[in-house]
Amino acid sequence: MTPDPLNRLVAQLAKLPGIGEKTAQRLAFHILRAPSEYAVDLSLAIREVKEKVHLCARCFSLTDTELCGFCRDSRRDERVLCVVETFADLMALERTREFKGRYHVLHGVLSPLEGIGPDQLRIRELLERLGDSKVEEIILATNPDVEGEATSLYLMRLLKPLGLRVSRIAQGLPMGGDLEYADQATLAKALSARREL
Amino acid sequence: MTPDPLNRLVAQLAKLPGIGEKTAQRLAFHILRAPSEYAVDLSLAIREVKEKVHLCARCFSLTDTELCGFCRDSRRDERVLCVVETFADLMALERTREFKGRYHVLHGVLSPLEGIGPDQLRIRELLERLGDSKVEEIILATNPDVEGEATSLYLMRLLKPLGLRVSRIAQGLPMGGDLEYADQATLAKALSARREL
């Protein structure tokens, strides 16, 4: 009994991650009530993001130009390259304002169970890129989980023989964390990776 | 440093209710990764819902035809009219499959503090509609909160003199509820509205 265009919108919204039927309905009602300009702007933004945003030809982050802002910015240090799983991880690192080097986005992690091997990631492109670059250190910033660790280990073995400095982001207790509630693996890592003061 | 079309999409998505910056970003990445057809379908669904869905000329529910499906369906009982605050409330009632009459959507509740008086709701249209109709009973199904109660009381005083049967949906403990955890107001209502068996 509900109008078809409304049903169609709810169905499309419900395909988004973390958006169930109920939330999709609430969002659809909101769009219906909002000014027409909002619907036009949102609709356009969705189409444009697909039409204009693509992978950077060098580092595979997201961009709407050939090379992304990170690769074009000459103030960023070309000697340090940070390897991340996803663009979202890259953005998280950017938010720290601590890293001023370049990036390389793998677009995934090694996961034999899901059929994702080195060929499915941007690893070949990483090696090609290193060929004629000024990179001296590679920071492996994959997630500290099983797949991320395996991917970092794989890359470390691949990159070390090229004479590069290879480092891994530190693992330990998070800031504001609590020893009492820390999981065993994290606490063990914090112990074994202790730093002399 | 993130591409403009992506920033624009995140900004538009973050305007949706219950969607913060982080969620908007996750949704934008999902749309970027999804097949192009999805972005086109979603984009189109958003525009169409604004272009095609409007209020039913009689009951003010949502429809993409002149009269909505509820008003056009001759199998529905014209003698019973259920008054609700919003189309979402109407849908909730429909899901019960218990009500087979007609509806009237007020599009809000009386709320002097927010400057919403009888003229801001579809109350005049309700009275006009009753003029030459077969309606015998009006069920007031506004929410059981302060504004909903006030609106029902207001409508009751308006409709009773017209010689109509006016009823209010029942209030009491929800099914599966627990006396121990029920709030005082609900429990008091459940007591005072007790039914002889």
Image (spheres, coloured by chain):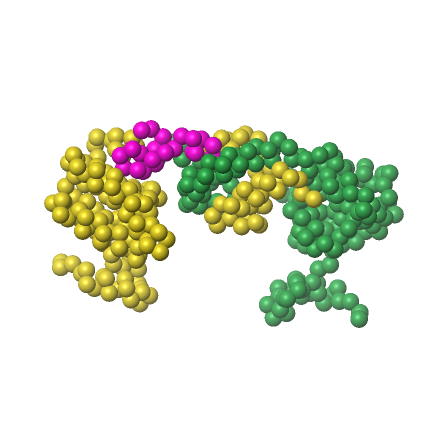
Chain colours: A yellow, B green
Give the residue drawn at x 81%, y 43%. B74
In this picture, residue B68 sits left or right of residue A185: right
Residue placed most toward the observer, A67 or B112: A67
Seen at 72% across and 67% down, the residue is B191
> How many numbered marks appear?
0
Q: Work out whether residue B110 can be spotted.
A: no
Residue A53 painted magenta = yes
At a point 24% along the width and 56% down the height, the residue shown is A171
| Residue A177 location (% of width, % of height) | 30, 60
Residue B139 located left or right of residue A181: right
Residue B94 colored magenta? no
Q: Quadrant of residue B70?
A: top right
Instruction: Judge by depth and name the residue closer to the eye, B127 or A30.
Output: A30
Q: Indicate whether B6 appears above or below A121.
A: above
Residue B166, horizontal then vertical, whole percent: 81, 51
Left or right of residue B132, residue B90 in this image: left
Tell me, yes or no, if residue B67 can be seen here.
yes
Q: Residue at x 31, y 64 (%)?
A: A182
Q: Is residue B127 above or below residue A179?
A: above
What span is colored magenta in the figure?
A46-66
Horizontal and vertical percent for residue B99? Answer: 75, 52
Q: Nearer the viewer, residue B179 or A122?
A: A122
Residue A36 x/y as whole percent: 57, 31
Tell me the quadrant of the picture where the C terminus of chain A can be found.
bottom left
Q: Quadrant of the N terminus of chain A?
A: top right
